[in-house]
Image (spheres, helix red, strand yellow):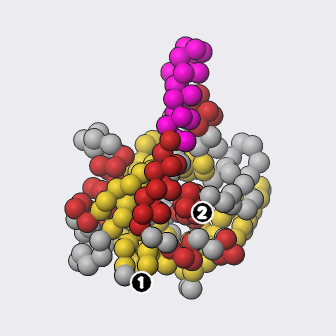
C-alpha cells in the first residue's frame, strides 16, 4: 500500500469521526447533559464490548489515554511497530501493545501524549513521525478511553527501550494486518462469563485484546471493508 493511499484513507475517516462527535455534542446540549456517556453512545466507541453481550462496557468516567499506531515506511512496504510489555508490570504484563499511555495534564492533545509516550518507551524522536489522523476511540475494560493516533514513521532511529515497561520492540508487515484471514475471534471464560475478543496471531506472537481491536479498526479504515463479527 502506498503512502498516498494511507494518508487519503485515514483522512477520509476523520470526517466520519468529526460528524459523530458533532452529533454527540448537539444531542448532549439538547438534553442538557454534559456527561461523557452521551458522547460515548452517539460516537459508538469501539472496545472490548464489541464482540460481546451487553454489560461489557466499562462504567464512566473513563480515564483518557492515547497510543501511537506507528506505520514504519520501509522501501519494501509498511510495517507496524509494536511493543511487548514487561512481564513485571502490574497491569497488562507481557501483552503486546502500541507505544502509549495515560494522557497527562501537561499534554496538549492525544497526539502530544502519544508522541511523548513513544519517545519515553522506545526512544522515538517526535520528528520521526508524520501524524495523519486518528482511529476510533477504544474503550478498555480497565477504565480507559484510548485515542489511537496514526503516524507514518521514518525508519532508522535508535530504539531505546524503557526497560521497566518494554521488554521487546518488533514490527509486523502491514500486509499481514490487511489480510482478513489473519483475523481470528477467540474466547475465554472470565468470572463465569464467556468473553470474545480479536486475535491476530503473528509467528510466535499473540496479539489480542485492545491492540488487536485497534488493528482491526485500521484494517477497516485502510481497506473500506467491514471486519468479521462486527
Secondary structure beneath dot 2 equals helix
Q: Which residue is mark 2?
A: 223
As drawn, the label of residue 136 is none
Look at the image and say whether residue 34 sits in the magenta stretch.
yes
Residue 130 shows in this picture: yes
Q: Nearer the viewer, residue 27 or 67?
A: 27
Q: Give the percent coordinates (x, y) of residue 90.
A: 45, 61
Q: Residue at x 37, y 73 (%)?
A: 73
**Earlier sequence position, callout 2 versus callout 1:** 1
**What range of the chain is rendered magenta?**
16-36
Disc 2/disc 1 C-alpha distance (Å): 19 Å
Q: Nearer the viewer, residue 102 or 129?
A: 129
Q: What crowding class fits label 2: few (fewer than 14 Cα within 10 Å), some (14-19), or many (20 or more)?
A: some
Q: Residue at x 51, y 49 (%)?
A: 12
As drawn, the label of residue 76 is 1
Residue 82 shows in this picture: no
Q: Give the percent coordinates (x, y) of residue 63.
A: 45, 41
Q: Is residue 124 left or right of residue 41?
A: left
Q: Give the percent coordinates (x, y) of residue 124.
A: 26, 67
Look at the image and say whether residue 83 sits in the magenta stretch.
no
Give the image quarter of residue 163. Answer: bottom left
Q: Give the percent coordinates (x, y) of residue 57.
A: 64, 44
Amino acid at each position: 500500500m502506498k503512502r498516498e493511499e494511507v494518508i487519503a484513507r485515514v483522512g477520509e475517516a476523520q470526517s466520519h469521526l468529526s460528524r459523530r462527535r458533532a452529533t454527540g455534542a448537539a444531542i448532549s446540549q439538547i438534553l442538557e447533559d454534559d456527561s461523557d456517556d452521551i458522547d460515548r453512545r452517539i460516537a459508538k466507541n469501539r472496545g472490548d464490548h464489541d464482540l460481546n453481550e451487553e454489560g461489557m462496557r466499562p462504567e464512566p468516567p473513563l480515564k483518557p489515554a492515547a497510543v501511537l499506531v506507528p506505520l514504519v515506511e520501509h522501501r519494501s512496504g509498511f510495517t507496524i511497530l509494536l511493543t511487548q510489555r514487561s512481564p513485571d508490570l502490574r497491569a497488562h504484563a507481557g501483552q503486546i501493545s502500541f507505544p502509549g499511555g495515560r494522557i497527562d495534564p501537561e499534554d496538549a492533545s492525544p497526539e502530544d501524549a502519544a508522541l511523548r509516550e513513544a519517545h519515553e518507551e522506545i526512544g522515538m524522536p517526535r520528528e520521526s513521525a508524520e501524524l495523519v489522523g486518528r482511529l476510533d476511540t477504544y474503550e478498555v475494560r480497565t477504565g480507559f478511553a484510548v485515542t489511537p493516533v496514526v503516524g507514518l514513521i521514518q525508519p532508522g532511529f535508535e530504539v531505546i527501550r524503557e526497560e521497566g515497561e518494554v521488554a521487546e520492540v518488533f514490527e509486523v508487515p502491514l500486509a499481514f494486518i490487511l489480510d482478513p484471514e489473519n483475523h481470528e475471534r477467540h474466547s475465554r471464560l472470565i468470572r463465569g462469563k464467556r468473553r470474545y475478543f480479536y486475535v491476530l496471531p503473528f509467528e510466535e506472537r499473540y496479539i489480542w485484546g485492545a491492540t488487536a481491536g485497534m488493528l482491526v479498526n485500521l484494517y477497516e479504515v485502510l481497506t473500506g471493508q467491514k471486519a468479521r463479527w462486527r
